[in-house]
Amino acid sequence: MKAHKIQQAPIPMRNVGPLKISGPVLDEKVSVPLATYETPLWPSVGRGARVSALVEDGIKTTVIDERMTRSILLEADDATAAMLAVESIKSRRDDLQAVVATSSRFAKLIEMNSQIVANLIYLRLEFTTGDASGHNMVTNAADKIIPWLLSEYPQLRYSSISGNYCSDKKATAVNGILGRGKYVVSEILIPRDICERRLKTTPEKVVDLNIKKNLIGTMIAGGLRSANAHYANMLLAFYLATGQDAANIIEGSQGIVHAEVRDGDLYFSCTLPNLIVGSVGNGKGLDFVEENLRALGCKEDREPGANSRRLAAICAATVLCGELSLLAAQTNPGELMEAHIKLER
Amino acid sequence: MKAHKIQQAPIPMRNVGPLKISGPVLDEKVSVPLATYETPLWPSVGRGARVSALVEDGIKTTVIDERMTRSILLEADDATAAMLAVESIKSRRDDLQAVVATSSRFAKLIEMNSQIVANLIYLRLEFTTGDASGHNMVTNAADKIIPWLLSEYPQLRYSSISGNYCSDKKATAVNGILGRGKYVVSEILIPRDICERRLKTTPEKVVDLNIKKNLIGTMIAGGLRSANAHYANMLLAFYLATGQDAANIIEGSQGIVHAEVRDGDLYFSCTLPNLIVGSVGNGKGLDFVEENLRALGCKEDREPGANSRRLAAICAATVLCGELSLLAAQTNPGELMEAHIKLER
Amino acid sequence: MKAHKIQQAPIPMRNVGPLKISGPVLDEKVSVPLATYETPLWPSVGRGARVSALVEDGIKTTVIDERMTRSILLEADDATAAMLAVESIKSRRDDLQAVVATSSRFAKLIEMNSQIVANLIYLRLEFTTGDASGHNMVTNAADKIIPWLLSEYPQLRYSSISGNYCSDKKATAVNGILGRGKYVVSEILIPRDICERRLKTTPEKVVDLNIKKNLIGTMIAGGLRSANAHYANMLLAFYLATGQDAANIIEGSQGIVHAEVRDGDLYFSCTLPNLIVGSVGNGKGLDFVEENLRALGCKEDREPGANSRRLAAICAATVLCGELSLLAAQTNPGELMEAHIKLER
Amino acid sequence: MKAHKIQQAPIPMRNVGPLKISGPVLDEKVSVPLATYETPLWPSVGRGARVSALVEDGIKTTVIDERMTRSILLEADDATAAMLAVESIKSRRDDLQAVVATSSRFAKLIEMNSQIVANLIYLRLEFTTGDASGHNMVTNAADKIIPWLLSEYPQLRYSSISGNYCSDKKATAVNGILGRGKYVVSEILIPRDICERRLKTTPEKVVDLNIKKNLIGTMIAGGLRSANAHYANMLLAFYLATGQDAANIIEGSQGIVHAEVRDGDLYFSCTLPNLIVGSVGNGKGLDFVEENLRALGCKEDREPGANSRRLAAICAATVLCGELSLLAAQTNPGELMEAHIKLER
């Protein structure tokens, strides 16, 4: 069974930066590790990083919310019974919290949302999960909650531990609207002359392209909350380098770039409502991952959640660098291709 | 600048299988390499693989279509001028093909689709790209086409080499409807007794869960063409092990599971309309990648495209194994969590 | 200016039924007025009504939720300021309720949801609005809330009284997930022999078609929470006959049909999460509208909201009749067209 | 059975305008009838109409495409058989055209699109239908095509005459991407001083609001190709006044407003990719409908399709008037509510 032993897929990785980052979560310069087969990503993010270093506040990041979710699927006899059960369950937050506490000392139930379809109940349980991204923690919690519910509400029947209303690793609207992962905004204000010298473009051109490509272009593509150029590239590379469950780039890729000309300068921002990252948990035991997390300052002795919020803020700043750089490049015919060719030689 | 030298992110990888695969593209047993931090994926796919080996035709795979796309963004003076320009451009397929030919000997223009918004033209160029997934090839082609168009149609202006109507690495509907990547279906017919003994469930339970979770659950989550449980996990692991641009799991995750009870047995299928894979190109130079591709039989001397279609078929069969296994597990309360806990010890 | 005087568009209208309806909201037989140019709708709904009359509980209806929404759009200096303002606003529910009270004696603020994009705040205000559908009531409330907020939070700036996160008369996911209008489920259990004799089909065929057409078909169409055949037709006709703002059929059309074979019989249900109806307010002063509402028993002296919940329940039962009838017809090749031709002669 | 006789729902209707319209389809001033319970719509559209009259070219309209669709649903034994059947069917365009010809002298098959899910075939048949909106024409055509296909391809089985991949009266992406109804753009260039005097706003404010509300606001609402404020209101009123199947406002509501400041003036446009209208067919026999169509110049002796394209162009211009007027109003805090209150007195 030689073929089946554990091997390794050594993916090229490089530190890029430093990025200058400010805001409530962190205020310092940080280099970020990016693991990817798409190596032109490194200089692309690097260009954004250099711009950040030239700007007074660098990239401001704000972590607006955090939660991890699991939607369980139960059945009642009919819609009326489903409605009554959901009303009752939602009113017993403390009881549920006690059940959750038996599954983990970090998981806290913060909200419940539900959908009833026919006699089916999709109950979306929302938790904070400390420094973990929380996939296993919420599954563990659901695993305790389900038998408790079935015993308290014998009129309900088990259907699934996950009803896809979570939603994990699928393109949906629910995560953006109700929240899943960290909700982070990164912003930068770039003086016109830096925009022109370093990005070889103008604030007006970047704003115009963002409207026509990211907003209108995505809209006509039938896009779902995905007004950006390539969040996914930066997320993948950051996730692989820091031991994240990289399939969560699917939710992560759903976010919105907003840019404006402000007093002649370029305001540029990336809103990332569904950034699923953790500084502990699955994938984190590996040496290079631990080293990367330490280098990012995300293994410090802080209150639960603070390390992972820091990680999320750095990730959002990284996404901004790559997004800014690509949009700037695409405002100029030819530059992108020239850069591509040069880099790949 | 020591911190910035190229390093490696060694991601755990294991060969899983063999899977028994049949159909027009390949008819043999294949073990598949999966690189992932989420190691419970290996036994999960492995269970599906063992079921495939017990079934007469194993997993049947069909490659229905293949194409790679780039949407350029141009501007006319008004909507009427935009319409007239698009009509003219679409009528000059041969001229465009000649321009494309100067950029690559593999890229062939097969279709053009367009959207006009106000005076803006989003022209989606669709190509076959041999054995490459084709990202660079279509960008190169667009890079030749744009100057040619601007010279032939001086009334048009450049706006962007990519107008997000491609759409690359974003959750949209256009890729599923017009096509991007390989369009593959994998199917299996599992006798009831194998379903019961190996998957510890019944055909009826799997069918029922697929309807309530993958179809209805995704629908109420505001999901976009994503009626599955976790395509993304298998895609990520397969993509990392075979040198693919793994951010394309975003499109790849959009696909549909359909299951039925047929004469008491379980028919189970995965439709993957947007599987972006290649057996040559970016990310393919690395030793372990080449070795994995060779072991999969995807580096043979075949007509252009045949190796990558084989790769796509194997990938679709792998997705089916993981999808089947998880759905079967979720039909039983508790099994998933037990499996998780056992594996992670 | 003779051409500009108010005229009338007399749309054909007929009473259909009676429908047999049960459940917490009403338990009786009701005939429903339907105004439409598509007159084959009458016999189609009529067939469903006749089936309901033969079934023990008729059509059970459950009103799960009710609310009307308006999303105001404000701007802060940056994302951090936006976050802090939103946190503060959400903590002052009582103050806001007092402001709302100055705009209407029926509007009650029940929830607030928000999205922050860059420095933009989309604040979704959710109200109960008595028996009115509530469009004007929530606009009036927003009109009081905005100046109050701008005075309490001078760091915020006005951007719009509606930021499209409401969302009114547009196909979005937010209404289904957060709620807008009445959330109603209608259900029926049809014995196999009635299914065969009256609907000329079998439970299995209806269930199968619902899966393949309403669930999978809509999914591949890139549909948004719209797993049904033609909710919109029944909604339009019911809305026009009862003085509703019929452009709200757009939200209304987003809902899910779920059908199952239960012990050989047909369980059939329509979930309508966004049924926007009122028994008072705009469009209600007209004689025929008042007459229709009275005939439906929706102008009685009840607690605020009860008349409009009754109206919603009747509407949902009507939708079920039309949906059931069309699906049954489409299980048989040819029947639909024959029916069409016969009716239009 | 007195209750069941045909009655009438007399909906308030008024002629608004005239609108000044130019472009390839028509070049003249036209007053438009609007039937609605929401009477503030009349002055709102009227304000846009007055602006159009002051502008050199008025509202330019362009009809880019036209088609009506029906998706039939067939089954094969497996995905390979489905693929082979679809390939064969698509290659026999002339044979299909001949079958279509037996159903109508106006319906012409212009394109076929398909989706294969598992062993299921969703075949989207696209037709031009002369001056009819074409619902019945394409159903009649499908009714002829299905038996022909089942006889030519005995390996296929009937599943449904409509597989929801059409898609009729549901919020989907497919209609925008592949086309359904008339695809129309209306545009206007409003000098700054007219914008300021007549719309009480500035070009910059309208552009800014369109970005933040229609583009970003809809995007975060999980909207589907619906970047507008209230297309649906104008469409409903126009459809009811001209005998259209008004449930098609669901597709119609999916469209995009694009605005720009151009040399200090306001460029404002409405793109309506799915405007389903006809000047003949269902709902057209009624006296007031015929009178309205005649007054709009849509009952002239023209080549088939020309009358309905004219109707579509006028409709798109009407939508622009209402959209422009509302957006302008919402740029000013308070104006909308004041206008509402004043009009409803």
Image (cartoon, coloured by chain):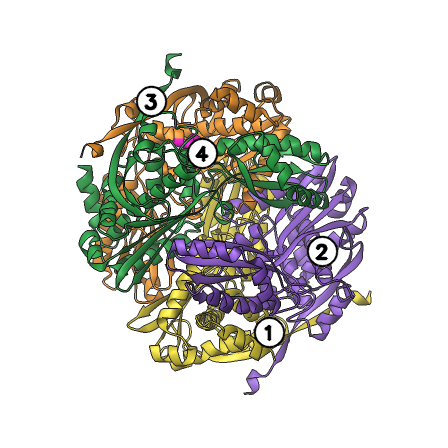
Chain colours: A green, B orange, C purple, D yellow
* Camera-nearest residue between B228 and D164: B228
Disc 4 residue type? Ala
Q: Chain of mark 4?
A: A
Residue D289 is tagged as 1
Question: Residue C233 vs residue C166: left or right?
Answer: right
Q: Chain of mark 3?
A: A
The structure residue drawn at horizontal position 64% and vertical position 71%, both measured from the top left corner, is C282
Whether pointer 3 and pointer 2 mark residues with C-beta atoms closer than 8 Å, the reply is no
Q: In the image as oriented, which residue stretches furthest toward the top?
A: A1
Camera-near label (1 vs 2) is: 2
3D distance between C-alphas at marks 1 and 2: 33 Å
Residue under label 3: A8
Residue B79 at x, y = what percent?
36, 65
Camera-near label (3 vs 2) is: 3
3D distance between C-alphas at marks 3 and 1: 72 Å
Q: Chain of mark 1?
A: D
Residue C73 is tagged as none
Q: Is residue B50 magenta?
A: no
3D distance between C-alphas at marks 4 and 1: 64 Å
3D distance between C-alphas at marks 2 and 4: 45 Å
- Residue A123 visible in rendering: yes
Residue under label 4: A132
Disc 1 residue type? Val
Question: Is there one chain holding both mark 4 and mark 1?
Answer: no
Secondary structure found at label 1:
helix
Disc 3 residue type? Gln
Which quadrant of the figure contains the N terminus of chain A? top left
Residue C254 at x, y = what percent?
58, 53
Q: Is residue A207 above or below residue D30?
A: above
Which quadrant of the figure contains the C terminus of chain A? top left
